[in-house]
């Protein structure tokens, strides 16, 4: 049995000419309703079938590379905008670093993104739209890096005169490395370290930047004294890796002096502006790196000859000055003649003085010998003995032993032996020695009480 409420609603809706509240198949209508996902899938298949391969020319806007490695951007012109996606694998294959404002030609397919109901292009390949767009991108990057001071002359480092070790960043299979090695061997054989890299194509810029940073990170004892970044000539597309920002920043950051030798003499890259010195060719870079060994030896030999000549000239001038001084100096005989004469005069006077002194002394001896007699000497000797005996008797009478002979004694402190002459000195000494005629006695000084002599104290005190 049908629901009366549904029937009433259906009738009212039909009477009003509007859709009913509940969808019901209409007479003659065989279109079944589809879901939003089914519609999005059909649109996606239609768009991808119709536009499976397209090439779009436009200007990059809103370029952004996310952490997953994919890149998202918009391509626009003066009338429309379309979103684009570059998957991670294709980003690494780009020959340049995409930037906002660059005019490019993108190759890929059109698809839809059902999550946002919009269409977009999946980009497989992207190139700059002509050499004009390439140069515009180059000038924009050059102005940016110049504004940061990467090309300033004050940042340039002087090259070493004679590097002991040279690092070369280039392709190991090209003719560039052979030209550099041959030129170095001809001019001045030097130890060369080669860091092999790709010099064009996808990933070349990253390899060159890693090689420069690798040389810079080596220990001081192993790192090169000079780095040469070299590549042969080619078109601007072939040399584009050396215009990449990552390479320019690596060159500017390198603490080792660096020579850029990219392309031929007419080729110029941003690496040339950031390097400490630009060489027109790789061979010219080798010539700039080291001097000619033969010229160096010739220069050293010239310096040696000049030094020897200078030394000889100083010696010759010294000899000339010495000869001139010798001519004006007085002769030896003229200088020493008066002294020699004075020495002869003093010698003669000394001989005469000695003879006179001997004569005078002999006369005094003769006179003294006549005055001397044996009896006189005996009397003088006896008088001397008497004076000595009297002096000794006086010494004995004044000595301390004379007091002991009269029955007295004297006191000396121990252990110093100083004579004690007062009671305070005796108390201070503590122990003393009593000297008697027949010997010595050691004694100890004790302080006495108020009574000089006291009787024995009773063993039991009394109360009376």
Image: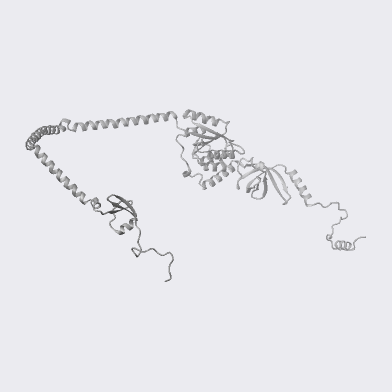
Looking at the image, which is closer to me, 423 or 134?
423
Q: How is the image coloured?
A: one colour
The answer to which of 133 and 224 lies nearer the viewer is: 224
Q: Quadrant of residue 444?
A: bottom left
Task: Pick out the residue farthest to the bottom.
Answer: 464
On-image quarter of the N terminus: bottom right
Which residue extends farthest right?
1
Relative to 424, is 66 on the left or the right? right
Residue 312, percent across and down? 30, 30
Q: Is residue 240 visible?
A: no
Q: Is residue 316 visible?
A: yes
Residue 271: horizontal and vertical position, in percent? 53, 40
Q: Is residue 326 left or right of residue 255?
A: left
Q: Is residue 131 above or below residue 430?
A: above
How many numbered markers are drawn? 0
Relative image position of residue 121 (x, y in whole percent):
69, 46
Residue 174 position by quadrant = top right
Which quadrant holds the C terminus?
Answer: bottom left
Which residue shows up at 53% across the image and 33% down it?
193
Q: Nearer the viewer, residue 421 or 155?
A: 421
- The image position of residue 257, as x and y in percent, is 49, 39
Please state if 267 lies on the left or on the right of 13 as rendered. left
């Amino acid at each position: 049995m049908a629901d009366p409420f549904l029937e009433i609603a259906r009738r009212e809706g039909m009477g009003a000419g509007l859709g009913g509240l509940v969808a019901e198949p209409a007479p003659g209508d065989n279109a079944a309703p589809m879901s939003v996902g089914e519609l999005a899938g059909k649109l996606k298949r239609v768009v991808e079938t119709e536009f499976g391969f397209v090439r779009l020319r436009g200007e990059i806007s809103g370029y952004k590379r996310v952490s997953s490695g994919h890149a998202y951007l918009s391509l626009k012109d003066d009338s429309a905008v379309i979103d684009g996606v570059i998957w991670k694998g294709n980003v690494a294959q780009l020959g340049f670093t995409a930037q906002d404002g660059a005019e490019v030609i993108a190759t890929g397919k059109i698809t839809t993104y059902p999550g946002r109901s919009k269409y977009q292009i999946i980009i497989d390949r992207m190139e700059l739209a002509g050499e004009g767009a390439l140069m515009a991108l180059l000038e924009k990057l050059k102005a940016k890096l110049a504004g940061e001071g990467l090309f300033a002359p004050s940042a340039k480092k002087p090259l070493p005169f004679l590097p002991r070790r040279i690092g070369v960043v280039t392709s190991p299979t090209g003719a560039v490395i052979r030209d550099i090695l041959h030129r170095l061997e001809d001019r001045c054989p030097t130890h060369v370290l080669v860091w092999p890299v790709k010099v064009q194509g996808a990933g070349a810029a990253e390899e060159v930047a890693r090689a420069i940073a690798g040389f810079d990170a080596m220990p001081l004892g192993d790192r090169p004294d000079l780095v040469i970044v070299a590549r042969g000539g080619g078109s601007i597309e072939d040399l584009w890796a050396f215009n990449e920002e990552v390479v320019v920043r690596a060159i500017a950051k390198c603490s080792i002096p660096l020579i850029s030798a990219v392309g031929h003499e007419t080729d110029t890259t941003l690496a040339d502006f950031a390097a400490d010195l630009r060489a027109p060719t790789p061979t010219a870079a080798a010539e700039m790196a080291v001097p000619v060994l033969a010229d160096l030896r010739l220069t050293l030999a010239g310096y040696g000859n000049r030094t020897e000549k200078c030394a000889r000239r100083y010696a010759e001038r010294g000899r000339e000055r010495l000869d001139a001084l010798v001519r004006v100096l007085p002769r030896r005989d003229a200088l020493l003649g008066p002294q020699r004469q004075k020495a002869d005069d003093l010698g003669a006077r000394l001989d005469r003085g000695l003879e006179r002194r001997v004569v005078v002394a002999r006369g005094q001896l003769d006179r003294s010998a006549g005055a001397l007699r044996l009896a006189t000497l005996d009397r003088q000797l006896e008088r001397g003995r008497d004076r000595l005996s009297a002096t000794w008797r006086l010494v004995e009478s004044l000595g301390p032993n004379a007091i002991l002979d009269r029955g007295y004694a004297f006191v000396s402190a121990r252990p110093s032996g100083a004579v004690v002459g007062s009671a305070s000195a005796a108390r201070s000494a503590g122990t003393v020695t009593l000297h008697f005629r027949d010997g010595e006695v050691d004694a100890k000084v004790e302080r006495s009480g108020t009574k000089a002599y006291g009787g024995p104290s009773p063993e039991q005190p009394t109360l009376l």
